[in-house]
Image (cartoon, rainbow, N blue to C red):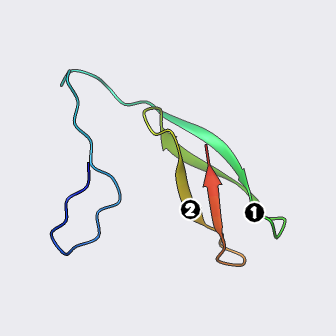
Amino acid sequence: MTNKTGKDVQLSFEFDNSNQKVKFITVTGKCRCGYSGEFKKGDIVLEMTVPCPECNAVIIIK
């Protein structure tokens, strides 16, 4: 769910169970320029994007 209030909102979550705890996992992402790095994402996140620190391209992490 995104809010259109004029400000950028990347993610917004609604949980049916407010007692649910989000676990963070470490995933590896690789850019087309060859940069490989580890990123942390919540286990409820299906896909996220991060900028490559080397060439500023977008790395898609699933």
The quarter of the picture where residue 45 lies is top left
Residue 61 is situated, as x and y percent measured from the top left of the image, at: 62, 49
- Callout 1 environment at 10 Å: few (<14), some (14 to 19), or many (20+)? some
The answer to whether 4 appears left or right of 30 in the picture is left
Residue 50's disc is 2
- Callout 2 environment at 10 Å: few (<14), some (14 to 19), or many (20+)? some
CA gap between label 1 and label 2 equals: 10 Å
Please, is residue 23 above or below residue 4 in the view? above
What residue is pinned by disc 1?
31
The answer to whether 53 appears left or right of 50 in the picture is right
SS state under label 1: loop
Residue type, label 1: Cys
Outermost residue toward the right? 34
Residue 10's disc is none
Residue 52 is situated, as x and y percent measured from the top left of the image, at: 66, 69
Outermost residue toward the bottom? 55
Q: How many marks?
A: 2
The C terminus appears in which quarter of the rendering? top right
Residue 53 is situated, as x and y percent measured from the top left of the image, at: 65, 73
Residue at 43% from the left image edge and 30% from the top image edge: 23
Please, is residue 35 above or below residue 56 in the view? above
